[in-house]
Amino acid sequence: MSVFFQQLLNGLSLGSIYALIALGYTMVYGVLKLINFAHSDVFMVGAFVGLYVAAAFGASGAGAAPLSVPAAVAVLCAAMAACALLGMSIERFAYRPVRTAPKLTPLITAIGMSLLLENLGQLVFGAEPERFPQILREVPYHLGGVVVTNIKIAIFATTLVLMWGLHRFVTRTWTGKAMRALSLNLDAARLMGIQTDRVIAITFGVGSALAAAGGILFGLDQTTVTPLMGILNGLKAFVAAVLGGIGNIPGAVVGGLAIGVSEQLVAGYVSTDYRDAITFGILIVMLLVRPQGLLGAIRSEKV
């Protein structure tokens, strides 16, 4: 039983990271009906920005002392700010010029931007895996047969705070209400005086900042980052968004947690060889049984 709870804990930790990445996918799709494939590589950039900012604080190399909690928060905020600017720049220079083009054009642009970021990442950061610095000193807590570390607790706490902040932002602020208006009807929102370009840019910025936070937490959890880390993790987060209902923010959270737990349980009780396969198996079953996702709704469209 302790093995089950340990795998469940690890799955929830990994699922929290998938949920943060999935939120970016679902926010952009909810507003523009666009799958931003470059989002997974923004997640990678966030991890490397955190790595270099942590190194600037002195947390790099063998035997380096962990950072203080304020310094660790500063690393997280720096990565989120950098990736928010990156996401808004991608929207401005890559997606906005083709926004009114046929749907295939933005899709190809997104794939091209993803490949560009991956190759730039290898050029700038190097192709070899990098060890993520020990931002926080790891302290284990033994609860029966389950080991809970302060790193896992920090991942849960950070994820909960960011999700609560996103919920408040979307439901309580004018910009959040404008995002919801755009998700219903972009043209009608423009006619009502909403500055759609500004709102879309903010949507990309917020989603990219969440992906950067996911990159930092992934580095803390997995200890190693690479320029191609966004490919598989981004696909899993996209599956999480589809599983929960693409365009549905609570659905992205539920989907991310479900994927993370499923992975860890399969790895623990079946084989680690199937931990990636189960994700895409779940996607196939979901598309066959409930294509709108767990929390999604079927919308009728006039043609």
Image (tube, grey):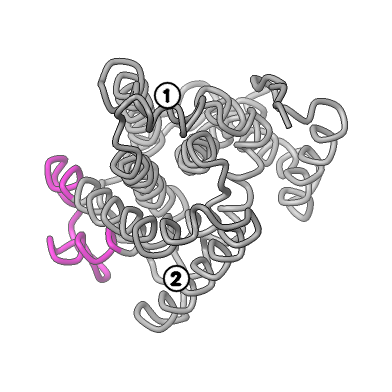
Is disc 2 in contact with disc 1, using a CB cutoff of under 8 Å? no
Q: Residues within 10 Å of mark 1 (few under 14, many from 20)?
A: some
Q: Which mark is residue 117?
A: 2
Q: Is residue 127 above or below residue 238?
A: below
- Residue at image x 63%, y 52%? 235
Amino acid type of disc 1? Answer: Ala
Q: Residue at x 40, y 84 (%)?
A: 123
Q: Earlier in the sequence, mark 2 or mark 1?
A: 2
Looking at this rendering, what residue extends furthest in the top direction? 172
Residue at (20% x, 66% y) in the render:
55
Q: Secondary structure at mark 1?
A: helix
In screen coordinates, is 195 left or right of 190? left
Magenta segment includes 56: yes
Q: Nearer the viewer, residue 259 or 2?
A: 259
Residue extending furthest right? 288
Location of the C terminus (image quadrant): top right
Which mark is on residue 181? 1
Say if residue 47 shows up in the picture: yes
Residue appearing at x 49%, y 60% in the figure: 98
Q: Quadrant of residue 254?
A: top right
Q: Position of residue 286 (x, y in %)?
A: 80, 32
Report x, y in % for residue 154. 33, 34
User: Is label 2 or label 1 in front?
Assistant: 1
Q: Is residue 10 above or below residue 228?
A: above
**Residue 18 visible in the picture:** no
Secondary element type, mark 2: helix
Q: Magenta region: which residues?
A: 49-74
Vertical arrangement, residue 210 with respect to residue 98, above or below: above
Place of residue 236 in the rendered image (x, y in percent of width and height, measured from the top left): 63, 47
Identify the image quadrant of the N terminus: top right
